[in-house]
Amino acid sequence: MNIVDALVLGIIQGLTEFLPVSSSGHLELGKAILGDNSIPEESMLFTVVMHFATALSTIVIFRKDIYQIFKGLFQFKWNEETQFALKIIISMIPAAVIGVLFEKQLESLFGGSIALVGGMLIITAVLLWLADKAKNTLKPVSTSNAFVIGIAQAIAMLPGISRSGATISTSVLLGNDKTKAARFSFLMVVPLILGKIAKDILSGDLTHTGNTSALIVGFIAAFIAGLLACTWMIKLVRNSKLTYFAIYCLIVGVIALSVSFI
């Protein structure tokens, strides 16, 4: 992968990680369009590094929230921050289990399967449309909700299913406040991504570096684009603008399926 391709894919990742249109799906489509012939392991490596960049942008945007959570935890009391941290941990369980047990199978899906991405984008479109029609409430995410949202996050490991779209939609359909749903969705993925990076480093899976310069350029592009998209997405969810993204996912999904059959 050359630097220009990495720049383009980094921008795509940064924008689509927070916008409910599937960052992994768009990365796979982008790789197919740009003619990326990386083996699945190298392709997955680039995807993981880009997700790390957007996780870092999430930390920057929600730095005050994260500080308050850690501050509350170190008070060693059953306070609001401790309860929120517990919900984050619970939400991580499904994706962590799937990631450990089916890692190789997941890697094999990140090789430019346009038909798979197209089908999953259509499913994302349906979820977004349903969530946009749901009434807004002031209800916070409960502990049981956190596990269900975690299952949605695990399913979103498939390329084409939007992680933010699936988790926010699931949360909203469970009757939660839309702004709180978006905040929970963005924060719940940070520990998983950081854990994935740590696991790959310790296991030596990141030795297949390929073009290091391309990874760095893609990382920076994804980080900057992620900062902009994260702020924008919170406003969009609050104002019930998800239908527009549902239409977009439906169109791109249909095009991807058509191209794959042709």
Image (tube, rainbow, N blue to C red):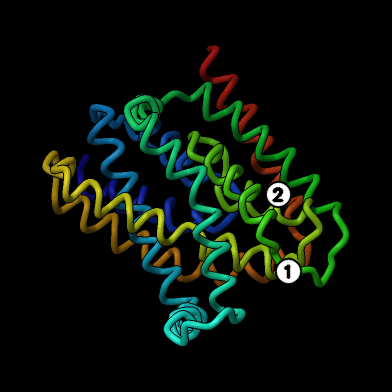
Looking at the image, is 77 positioned above or below residue 202?
A: below
| Quadrant (top left/top right/bottom left/bottom right) for the N terminus | top left
Looking at the image, is 188 positioned above or below residue 155?
A: below
Q: Amino acid at mark 2?
A: Thr
* SS class, disc 1: loop
| Residue 109 falls left or right of residue 236 | left
Residue drawn at x 66%, y 32% as measured from the top left: 122
Residue drawn at x 71%, y 51% as measured from the top left: 169
What x and y, as percent, mark residue 61? 47, 76
Q: Which mark is residue 170?
A: 2
The part of the image, by quadrant, that contains residue 105 is top left
Name the residue beneath numbered marker 1: 140
Q: Amino acid at mark 1?
A: Pro
What x and y, as percent, mark residue 112? 39, 27
Contact (Cβ within 8 Å) of mark 2 with mark 1: no
| Residue 119 falls left or right of residue 109 | right
Question: Which mark sits nearer the N-terminus, 2 or 1?
Answer: 1
Residue drawn at x 30%, y 38% as measured from the top left: 44
